[in-house]
Amino acid sequence: MGFLGLRELLVVVWCILLILLCCSIEISFGSTTRHFKWAVEYMFWSPDCQESVVMGINGQFPGPTIRAQAGDTIFVQLTNKLHTEGVVIHWHGIRQRGTPWADGTASISQCAINPGETFDYRFKVDKAGTYIYHGHFGMQRSAGLYGSLIVEVGEGEKEPFHYDGEFNLLLSDWWHQSVHDQEVGLSSKPFRWIGEPQTLLINGRGQFNCSLAAHFSNTSTNACTLRGDEQCAPQVLPVLPNRTYRLRIASITTLASLNLAVGNHKMVMVEADGNYVQPFEVEDMDIYSGESYSVLLTTNQDQSKNYWISIGVRGRKTQTPQALTLLNYSPTSQSKLPILPPPITPTWNDYDHSKSFSNKIFALMGSPKPPKNSDRQIILLNTQNYIDGYIKWAINNISLLLPSTPYLGSIKYSLKSAFDNKNPPENFANDYDVMKPPINPNSSNGNGVYMLGLNITVDVILQNANALAVNVSEIHPWHLHGHNFWVLGYGEGKFSANKDEKKFNLRNPPLRNTVVIFPFGWTALRFVADNPGVWAFHCHIEPHLHMGMGVVFAQGVEHVNDIPDQALACGLTGKRFMKNTKQN
Ligand code: C2O
Ligand code: CU
């Protein structure tokens, strides 16, 4: 099997030429603006060797990787070339300080971009790190609308670790059923679940019904006969012996929680969600949807061999096979298959393994510390409920159903009828048993907003519970827009203020933008509401968000000025309406 040929080299050269053409770089007074013109459209593609319709950008899947330096301005002119639906793109992990309208959340920060229209995303990337971007309207992320956003340290700055080269691994999961069908199933009575993914993808490439490692298994899996230039052929990582490589690993899965391991190699964790962590060594790592990590890997193994990089599913019992690619020590010769079998993913329900990994992550010494006390504590109970016979996820018994007018404009211009003005509940009934299936008939759809005072310190306690089925509680990775938060701790069962607050880690908690709650457990986090705007906080599992698993935080919206008309061109903030209200 030869992956690296002249053909590939030509493709690379073409890509570089295309990138140079598509992205013009303006440099003015020391700060750089990186300008991109992107068109989103459906196209035929074979992510896992089987042809599907995917949502691509400029004819690519995954979308083009953006590389920038801390302090740069990114300017993406996004044209919607889908014929019948709106679109937005969210820049996951970028805080959008001063540009909350560029956060790319439909119904929250902006109106969805109509077919044929163009929206200008102009924002600063102020912090080095590994980030992602993705669709944030309906389930467009699951349709394949995603890519990598990598921010290098600013001019004259240094990373607190050394490496000789780097690779980018964007992890996702893929279904053969169309996202449209999936959405209809999730919103139907009776409910139809999307099931488990057919294939896991690494940089948009996976192999369905065809195993790279078939020669290791005694099952009847077909061996892959790939030439190497297929859309589904794995991207091999060419390395030199005795060097240190930075692997930037980000997960944009729809559903799957993943574990990644590299045969025979240990990894040293150095970055999480764009924040440095106290380095620690691991044999394998868990990664949940919405998270990103950088690990350092030293090529100190037998250089006459190659090694597997493997990802597999955690936290759900699936048949979805591992995805594999190769760490190739001999870039000059043809890649050969490893002699050792791929690393085995830990058992799906070995949660102790996952918890012990999460509990090893601490902020790098010298990182900013959380305020000692919080001004407000919000407890969010996560349950699965029936609402009018539909299955939904609810937070304190409210399932998020987004309004037609984006919050940013409606709060800024006090359009009170645009959403429910009552503050949503900050806690749940004291006698609620988190270990029992929810029987609460009072849950409802809602779109209220937690109004946070500007600059207050907020504690959020995410409380997991039993789902509708007996003895089932699921993993939920929660992602906060516009901020990083400190992860103060994880615990089992029901959170107890008296007992558990004393155990909060205020010394070196890691800063993150995504954090997991384990089955039947709780997770505590703290953030400072210092970024005027309206920000989503939600489970990053796409069908869960679609089923209402999220809340909305607003802060200091009166300080947000110059919201572009483009972001207001719908619902009650539609331009004509705005003009009328200004005149009256
Ligand atoms: Cu990456 Cu609101 O999500
Ligand atoms: Cu979830």
Image (tube, grey):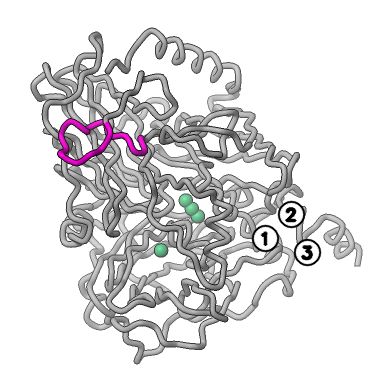
Q: Residue at (66%, 66%) from the top-left corner?
A: 403
Q: Nearer the viewer, residue 551 or 55?
A: 55
Residue indicated by mark 3: 572
Q: Of label 1 and label 2, which has the lower sequence position?
A: 1
Give the magenta range: 207-222
Figure quadrant of residue 220? top left
Residue 208, given in percent of the width and then of the height, sits at: 36, 38
What is the chief secondary structure element of the magenta stretch? loop
Residue indicated by mark 2: 568
Ligand 2 quarter of the rendering: bottom left
Mark 1 Cβ and ligand 1 under 8 Å apart: no
Q: Is residue 166 magenta?
A: no
Residue 265, given in percent of the width and then of the height, sits at: 14, 33
> Given the current orientation, which residue lies at the most extreme bottom position?
431
Q: Quadrant of the N terminus?
A: top left
Residue indicated by mark 1: 406
